[in-house]
């Protein structure tokens, strides 16, 4: 049975040393004439002592919650090693099939029974068609999912991934009411993390402003309200590119992988919309002040 991909859309810093005191006049002899006379010169000012280095987590390291999520996807993908009959049963039992909820046409008995009508709203997002499918989703999770996992913590992050997966499944159900092909892939959840992350990604000091080296601090900058985010030029530019890519996938009916499975771009939009709107329900960081600077503003150096 063909699958509809819900994805592809399925060192610490060096210690600063205190400058040494001016060396005594050791250069003598033939080099002495090159040295300026010390008479009448002001003594050199010693630079203020810098605070002790505070350990910082590099931006590119993965938080534990995201690492666990990626490992879960990898372990579940080992199902492809099962015999074909059992592997197909797994996709039918845990993939999201709109026809499962359709009682107006000829009834079809799908694996999983009545329980599958509940759990497949989430479990479909843990299945992938092939390595390129899972790899593409993980690639997008690295920047956006890392920041969100650090900001939310493990429990909020996992619940958020489940909620956005369910929103993507609902969007797919509305637009593919009688479809029999199972939808699989984490792209609805990945789209949700991207939408949630842009609520704080462009704020000065965040992970897309490139003005910090501390991943935890960059992930916990105050977020913009939804209305302020939708007036931010960088957020609007990101939205235009993201929706443009998804529309191209949809109108072009682009297939992914050797199996020729199509992209469930409506599920991506459902997950994205849920992540953008529901972000505030999960966010533990206090809201940004109305005059908070964003990444487009000029960074002010901290001197003194």
Image (spheres, rainbow, N blue to C red):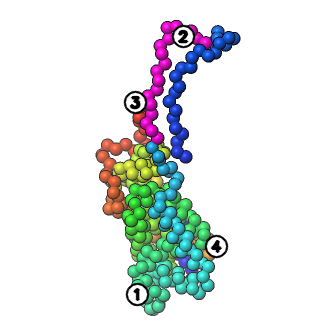
Label 2 or label 1, whichever comes before in sequence order: 2
Is residue 233 in view?
A: no
Q: Residue 197's spot in the image, x, y percent?
A: 42, 56
Residue extending furthest toward the top: 39
Give neighbour class at mark 1: few <14, some 14-19, many 20+ (Cα, 10 Å): few
Q: Which residue is mark 3?
A: 304
Marks 4 and 1 sit apart, C-alpha to C-alpha, by 32 Å
Q: Which residue is mark 1?
A: 114
Tell me the quarter of the image containing the C terminus: top left
Residue extending furthest toward the right: 30
Residue at image point 30% right, 46% down? 289
Q: Residue 213's spot in the image, x, y percent?
A: 48, 45
Give the quarter of the image for residue 14.
Answer: top right
Nearer the observer: mark 2 or 1; the answer is: 2
Asked if the residues shown at circle 4 and circle 2 are in contact, with their CB atoms under 8 angstroms apart, the answer is no
- Number of numbered discs visible in the structure rendering: 4
* Secondary structure of the residue carrying numbered label 3: loop
Q: Point out the stretch of residues depicted in magenta.
A: 35-53
Nearer the observer: mark 4 or 2; the answer is: 2
């Amino acid at each position: 049975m063909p699958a509809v991909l819900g994805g592809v859309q399925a060192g610490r810093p060096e210690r600063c040393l205190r400058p040494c005191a001016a060396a005594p006049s050791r250069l003598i002899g033939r080099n002495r004439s090159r040295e300026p006379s010390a008479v009448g010169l002001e003594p050199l000012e010693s630079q203020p002592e810098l605070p002790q280095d505070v350990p910082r987590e590099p931006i590119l390291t993965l938080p534990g919650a995201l690492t666990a999520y990626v490992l879960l996807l990898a372990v579940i993908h080992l199902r492809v090693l099962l015999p074909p009959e059992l592997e197909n049963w797994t996709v039918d039992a845990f993939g999201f099939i709109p026809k499962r909820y359709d009682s107006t046409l000829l009834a079809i008995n799908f694996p999983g029974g009545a329980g599958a009508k509940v759990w497949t709203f989430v479990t479909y997002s843990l299945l992938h068609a092939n390595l390129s499918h899972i790899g593409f989703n993980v690639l997008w999770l690295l920047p956006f999912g890392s920041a969100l996992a650090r900001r939310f913590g493990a429990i909020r992050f996992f619940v958020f991934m489940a909620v956005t997966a369910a929103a993507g499944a609902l969007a797919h159900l509305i637009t593919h009411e009688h479809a029999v092909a199972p939808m699989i892939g984490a792209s609805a959840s990945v789209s949700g993390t991207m939408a949630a992350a842009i609520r704080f990604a462009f704020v000065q000091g965040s992970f897309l402003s490139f003005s910090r080296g501390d991943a935890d601090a960059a992930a916990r900058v105050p977020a913009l309200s939804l209305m302020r985010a939708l007036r931010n030029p960088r957020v609007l530019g990101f939205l235009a590119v993201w929706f443009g890519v998804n529309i191209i996938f949809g109108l072009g009916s682009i297939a992914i992988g050797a199996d020729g499975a199509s992209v469930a771009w409506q599920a991506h939009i459902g997950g994205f919309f849920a992540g953008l709107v529901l972000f505030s329900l999960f966010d533990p960081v206090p809201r940004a002040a109305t005059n908070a600077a964003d990444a487009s503003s000029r960074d002010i150096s901290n001197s003194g």
